[in-house]
Image (tube, rainbow, N blue to C red):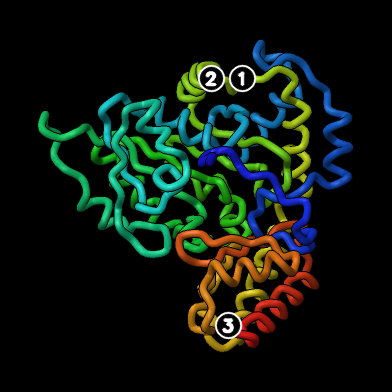
Amino acid sequence: MTYYTPARRDLKAPPVRINLLSDTQTRPTPGMREAMARAEVGDEQVGDDPSANLLCDRVAELMGKEAAVFLPSGTMCNVTATLVHCRPGDEILAQFSAHIIAREGGAHAALGGFQITPLHGADGKFTPDTFRAALHPRTRYQPPQTLVSAEQTANIGGGTIWKKADLDEVVKIAKANGLATHMDGARLLNATVATGISARDMTAGWDSAWIDFSKGLGAPIGAVIAGTRDFIDEVWRWKQRLGGSMRQSGICAAACTYALDHHVDRLAEDHANARTLARGLSQIQGIEVQEPETNLVFFKPDGAGISAADMVAALNKRGVQIAVMDGRIRACTHLDVTAAQIEEMIGHVREIARVV
């Protein structure tokens, strides 16, 4: 039995027609593929890839930071950030369902020797008061608290958005107590589109922040982390150590730049589809739905007499790819999911619930 190797898709299974598994399932659009094919490239490791450099400069400007660096994944953004901000034995504070705790394979403990203290809070967020209460005096009996992390949007919390006032207050508390601040911005631009608050304002005061291009923005790979020039210089050291330094990365960077130019505003369509899906599901007797703030819809079918796992299995047989996350079904809208497919999905759930 294998535990870690992903199982390949069963070729006898029904073809996937509606893919709500994740916004990471997006495929590059024709325009994005053309941009990748035309990308001017060089050797990233010697600073000579113009397309990668352009992307990093764009993201640094977007978030109001001094510098930025292109990395293969969002997980590597989080890992390199903690490796730069912290030292072995240090303590990081984050909400208990945060990606750095629940979805990164213990990388921060394994690679950095860091302790992550989970903070309680609803919908994937902790309050400034909860953060303040978790701080302790600096003493040799306890680990140094060096970093606080917030996830924007909060994935397992339901794609919820941190309020700007809370983000600012967390920064204020952190600075007053000598902690650095890190924003996991995997779906940061979903938050900016939903609120109308710019990425620059949303990340103001945060020492490091990043955006993922392989989710709703539709690129096949990559994320960019930004911060001070000194911070990014140290990230480069860990990028090399972790095998994240690439060569002609401009081919992938060009896809990300294309996404910035063409796929940001359209995130609003994903949010609208998520609201339509939630509204339709909530009208089915026994389906409990969390009202979405962005592109993630979490729901429980137990009240309809069917478990989440059985509902997912039944949907998979109908060509709907979806999964259980944290005990609930998560449906993720993205640029490859149409409004018509949302209506079809609602119909499938209604039929499955009726048969039970």
Mark 1 secondary-structure assignment: loop
Along the polypeptide, which appears first: circle 2 or circle 3? 2
Q: Which residue is mark 1?
A: 245
x 35%, y 47%: residue: 94
Mark 3 secondary-structure assignment: helix
Image height of 249 relative to 142, above or below: above
Q: Is residue 72 visible?
A: yes
Toward the viewer: 170 or 188?
188
Image height of 328 relative to 192, above or below: below
User: Which quarter shows the C terminus?
Assistant: bottom right
Tell me whether circle 1 and circle 2 mark residues in contact (CB < 8 Å). yes
Inspect the image, locate mark 1, and give the three-letter code of the amino acid beneath it: Ser
Which dot marks residue 236? Answer: 2
Toward the viewer: 51 or 90?
90
Which dot marks residue 301? Answer: none
Q: Is residue 204 visible?
A: no
Q: CA distance from mark 1 to mark 3?
A: 46 Å
Along the polypeptide, which appears first: circle 1 or circle 2? 2
Position in image of residue 100 (x %, y %): 43, 42
Q: Which residue is mark 3?
A: 282
Mark 2 secondary-structure assignment: helix
x 69%, y 24%: residue: 53
- Camera-near label (2 vs 3) is 3
Position in image of residue 8 (x %, y %): 68, 44
| Residue 272 falls in image quadrant | bottom right
Q: CA distance from mark 1 to mark 2?
A: 8 Å
Position in image of residue 212 (x %, y %): 61, 42
Q: CA distance from mark 2 to mark 3?
A: 47 Å
x 73%, y 50%: residue: 26
Inspect the image, locate mark 2, and give the three-letter code of the amino acid beneath it: Trp
Asked whether, in this view, residue 149 is left or right of residue 136, the answer is right
- Camera-near label (1 vs 2) is 1
